[in-house]
Image (cartoon, rainbow, N blue to C red):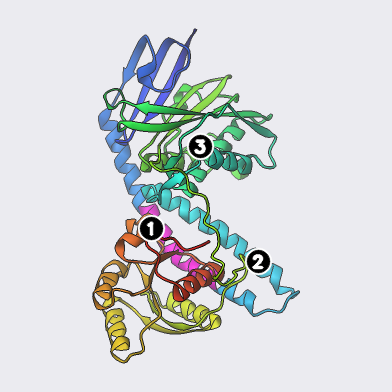
Amino acid sequence: MIASIFQVFVSTTDNFRYHYGYNARFIRCRRAHVMTHRTETTKDRSDLKRQIRQLESIAALSGGIAHDYNNLLTAIMGNISLAMEHIPPGSKLSPLLEQALSASRVAKTLTRRLITFSKGGQPTKSPTDIVHLVENAAAFSLSGSNTNYHVGPVQEIWPAQVDAQQIGQAIHNLMVNAVESMPGGGTVSIDFKNVTIDSSTSLLAAGRYIDIAITDNGVGIPAEHIEKIFDPYFSTKDKGANRGTGLGLSISHSIVIQHGGEITVTSRVGVGTTFHVLLPVGETPALANAPASPTAKQQSPDKPVHGGGKILVMDDEAMIRELAGNLLQHLGYEVDFAEEGQMAVRKYQAAMNASKPYDAVILDLTIRGGMGGEETISRLKAIDPSVKAIVSSGYSDNPVVAHYQEYGFCDVVAKPYELIEFSQKLYRLVTGDCPTPDRQPAT
């Protein structure tokens, strides 16, 4: 038993935050209801609602900016990757273009973080080996630092129902926070536990969860800061070059909540901090990567795949249409364009009537002042139930992007995209069948 004063900040699925002061005797605390001798509880709902409205305004602005940046980055990254195809090996231009492309990839990561922060980023969930995912994220996050990590005993931990990329980002942010709290180095402890939640005693929905505990022995979080740690742009780092963005923990919070989970923190100044992340369990075992089809064309992961066929591209941005045309022609395809959905439907119908159908269509999800990809694919399905369509969008939080097959699409290319990814997905679609949720393409 330990008697001590702890500050606990709880972030919940209803987007309210609760601050508790405790003078408690406990063995180990995770959530408020497991502690004893609660001495103080404060909840100012009006202030919380005002803060949430401010957060929503910032989030809406961030999401809109990120979408516009994605269109610009698509043109930048696509043209750079295409330019690299036209220069001879060993050219002095190669490292310059590669540096520009690397910088663009960093910008791509930042825009995705803004989208995740703005709406949580609609997760594409699947049963995932959460222990393997967290270990990989931890190893990557701590690479090159003076901090190690230790994983506690793992006994038949359930698979989690998560978006692996998003949860990897959330864990990465928590690990970076742990490293920064231990400037002299140290060890981050990671523990996993299967838990079953009873709805009568928890803010979470009843069910099975995995509890991931990430503990550092760093400086701890002062009481005056603990209520703000999940707020956007809050940072205690120094000004200048070492100034933090203040988005890391906000993004982690957004991701976990969007997954139907919970993130909580306990901290003691001079002792350390523990973050607990609860994630829902998947109903089926984690899937291994499918073996490559022996009949599929061998695809090098760092080379574009050339093909052939007739492709219809719908996008309201002239620079994106021009880029797509240049990419497709370079890859060996014939290309046609539509600026909005009604034009795309007319062209598709005319091509079928002339017995010269398109082999695939690429539809932008959002068209300003016109019919977008969701309605367009519905119209095309009515004309041709076997239409092969790829949805393309800078809005990664849109449910059509996350669950594209449910809307009639065969695949998704998220903006900004590069030549290699673009070519490989298109080749698989043109030369194969449109995958269904029960039949995924070989990787």
Q: Earlier in the sequence, mark 3 or mark 2?
A: 2
Query: Where does the image place residue 46, in percent across and percent down from the top left?
Result: 25, 31
Whether residue 75 is visible, yes or no, is no
Name which residue type carries label 1.
Asp
Q: As rendered, which of 273 and 391 lies closer to the eye?
A: 391
Residue 388, position in %: x, y?
37, 73
Q: Which quadrant of the figure has residue 42?
A: top left
Cα distance in 3D space between marks 1 and 3: 45 Å
Instruction: Assign a secondary structure to mark 3.
Output: loop
Residue at 37% from the left image edge and 43% from the top image edge = 258
Q: Are marks 3 and 2 in contact (CB under 8 Å)?
A: no
Number of marks: 3
Residue bearing mark 2: 98
Residue to which mark 1 is pinned = 438
- Judged by depth in the image, the label closer to the viewer, 1 or 3, is 1
The residues colored magenta run 61-78
User: Earlier along the polypeptide chain: callout 1 or callout 3?
Assistant: 3
Residue 413 disc label: none
Q: Amino acid at mark 2?
A: Glu
**Mark 2 or 1, nearer chain start:** 2
Query: Where, by quadrant of the figure, is residue 10 drawn?
Result: top left
Q: What residue lies at 28% left-to-right and 77% top-to-bottom?
A: 384
Q: Is residue 418 above or below residue 358?
A: above
The residue singled out by tag 3 in the image is: 235
